[in-house]
Image: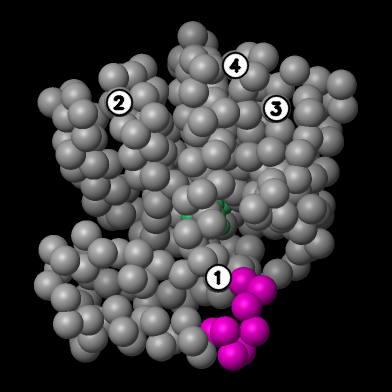
Amino acid sequence: MEKSSQQQEASYQIETTASSEQLAFRGKLQEAFVNSPLSVEDKLFNIGLYTRSSVLVKFLVMSEIYQRICPIPGCLIEFGTWWGQNLVLLENLRAIHEPFNKQRTIIGFDTFDGYTPLSDRDKESEVWSENSYSTGKDYVEYLRKLLESHEGCNVLGHVRGRHKLIDGDVSQTAPKYFKDHPETIVAFAYFDMALYQPTKAALEAVKPHLISGSVLLMDELTWDESPGEAIAFKEVFDRDEVTIEKCLLYPSKAIITIR
Ligand SMILES: C[S@@+](CC[C@H](N)C(=O)[O-])C[C@H]1O[C@@H](n2cnc3c(N)ncnc32)[C@H](O)[C@@H]1O
């Protein structure tokens, strides 16, 4: 099947630990998806047919974390959203776990232009190279509408547009956002940028807005390939300010709870 000009070919390497044999089976799943005998409507309704375990686990992890933060007031943030799947997931978990809570603003920060340059605290990698994971700036509007459509499908669907996408380098946008919104309380923040500088800037910006019980999810805290994330974390938080757990279902992620 031909790709429309709107669809992007990934010109960058996605982080993966899959073997070549596993990648070949992934290719078969892709073929099955593209050549599916299902109508678009049935395909979307039966999307689990094509959802592999390494993707499903992300949904399960988010669902577990959502249940932890349910009693904590405040917004939900992702630093490094890429296509925004987690933002959509958070909106839908909100609808499942607390359908009448319209106070849960969900905020996504990204350059939408991919990675910014590495610092001397980061390790050279094809995965985090400059502009990799770019969605293209036009995608911001597409994602905004997608989030609104999900809000519209959910309970209280007449209240839409509560979520925010903040476009630009987090090193500038995160300090500015919290300066402009000093009232913000953050229940949950997901850090998935891997690099030292944006992670440090985002951690520093968010810290004064966390409360006891707020949860941070660090995607690459123990990854050899991304030492910058752990260095930034250790520079911003003292050990006695937080508890740190390995994510049971996804061992490379760490769950931080504010004491
Ligand atoms: C690995 S992807 C995130 C994947 C996403 N969290 C998910 O689970 O689907 C990393 C994202 O961080 C973004 N990013 C990297 N450096 C950034 C910076 N300095 N400011 C804002 N976003 C940045 C990239 O554009 C990219 O979309």
Q: Which residues are magenta?
A: 16-23
- Looking at numbered disc 1 in the image, what kind of residue is underneath it? Ile
Q: Which mark is residue 99?
A: 2
Query: Which x, y percent locates residue 146?
Result: 24, 47
Alpha carbon separation for disc pair 3 and 2: 24 Å
Q: Residue at x 62, y 78 (%)?
A: 18
Q: Quadrant of residue 92?
A: top left
Q: Nearer the viewer, mark 2 or mark 1?
A: 2
Q: Are marks 3 and 2 in contact (CB under 8 Å)?
A: no
Secondary structure, mark 1, is loop
Is 84 situated left or right of 235 in this image?
left
Question: Closer to the N terminus: mark 3 or mark 4?
Answer: 4
Which residue, given by chain and number where applicable, does mark 1 sit on? 14
For marks 3 and 4, give the CA distance. 14 Å
Which residue position holds label 3? Answer: 257
Going by the picture, which residue comes out furthest to the top?
A: 183
